[in-house]
Every structure is written in structure tokens, then in C-alpha cells.
Amino acid sequence: MEAILPFSVAGASHLSAKSTCDPDSQTISAESTPAALTSLVPAIGYKTASEPFLQKIRALIEDKLSEDLPIEELAKGVFYTRVQVYRKIKTLTGQSPSRFIRTVRLQKALELLVTTDFSIAEIAYEVGFRDPKYFTRVFTAEFGKAPSAFML
């Protein structure tokens, strides 16, 4: 799906930005995810010139995986305002920043489920969820199977 978003900056209405977002794609760009997982993990859907931006955001999220991560902190990490980060992530991925953070955390959880022998609760806490029941619910909604189905 290709989206053209006009900018309404005073005197610059002729500008437009193009981004491609294919959420049905079965590829991801996380270097840390084993190749066997790429068919299981839904793609965040970015293949644009702004991919370095999303890689930087993803790195910031992974650095603070087990902590609360406000959008303002992400914005500081990439030298944008909170509103600019929201708009850019929404445009590039089709997700809000909080949903994008959750998706990154769930992808990391999937990787841990497949590659380690930690319990579901340990993994939930490790990737930043405070409640293992909530983690299980959103994990199942994201991947279509309960976390226990992916355990070693």
C-alpha cells in the first residue's frame, strides 16, 4: 500500500512524502531475530529511505526493553519532537508509537521463547510487561498462538 501525505506547512503545500507500508509482508529487519522466526513474526512493514530512522527507534526501544519508555524519550533519542516522532512512525509503519513499542517487545519475546528456556512470566518481565496475563493476551492477539506454543 502506498500512501502520499501532503504537508500543510505555510507556503509549502506543494511538498509531499511517499512511504511504502506493507503490513502483509512476512519479513522483518531485526538483525537479532533468527532466520527461522521471520515467517512467524508479522512485519512492521517498512522498506523506505527512513529505515535508518526506524532502526534507531528500534535500537532505543531494545536498549530500554524492560523499562517504561515514554514517547518523549524516543523523541529525544532521535532529536525530534514528540509529535514528529508520532507522525513519522505512524506514516512509516501504520502503527502508533506505543503500538510500535509493543510490537518490538512482542517480537523480542517471541525470539526469547524460541531460543531460551525462560518461563513465560520471566520473558514477559524481561521485555517490559508488568503483567504476564496481559502479556499472554496481547502475544496471542499478535501472533495467533499462545506463548506456550512457541516454548522449547
Image (tube, rainbow, N blue to C red):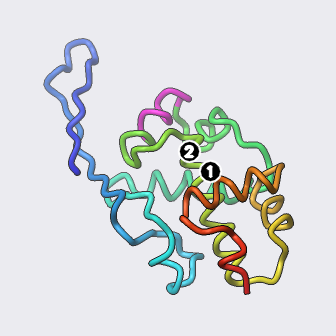
Asked if residue 84 is among those painted magenta in the image, a careful observer would answer: yes
Q: Which residue is mark 2?
A: 99
Instruction: Tell me the tag on residue 102.
Output: 1
The kind of residue tagged 1 is Arg
Residue at 26% x, 25% y is: 7
- Which type of secondary structure does the marked residue at label 1 adopt? helix
* Residue 135 vertical placement versus 83 (above, below): below
The quarter of the picture where residue 144 lies is bottom right
Residue 19 in the figure: left or right of residue 128 = left
Q: State the image coordinates of residue 135 (x, y, percent, origin top left).
A: 73, 55
- Tag 2: amino acid: Arg
Say whether marks 1 and 2 touch (CB < 8 Å).
yes
Q: Quadrant of residue 77?
A: top right
Callout 1 environment at 10 Å: few (<14), some (14 to 19), or many (20+)?
many
Which residues, given as a range, are shown in magenta?
Answer: 81-88
Residue found 62% across the figure and 37% down from its top: 76
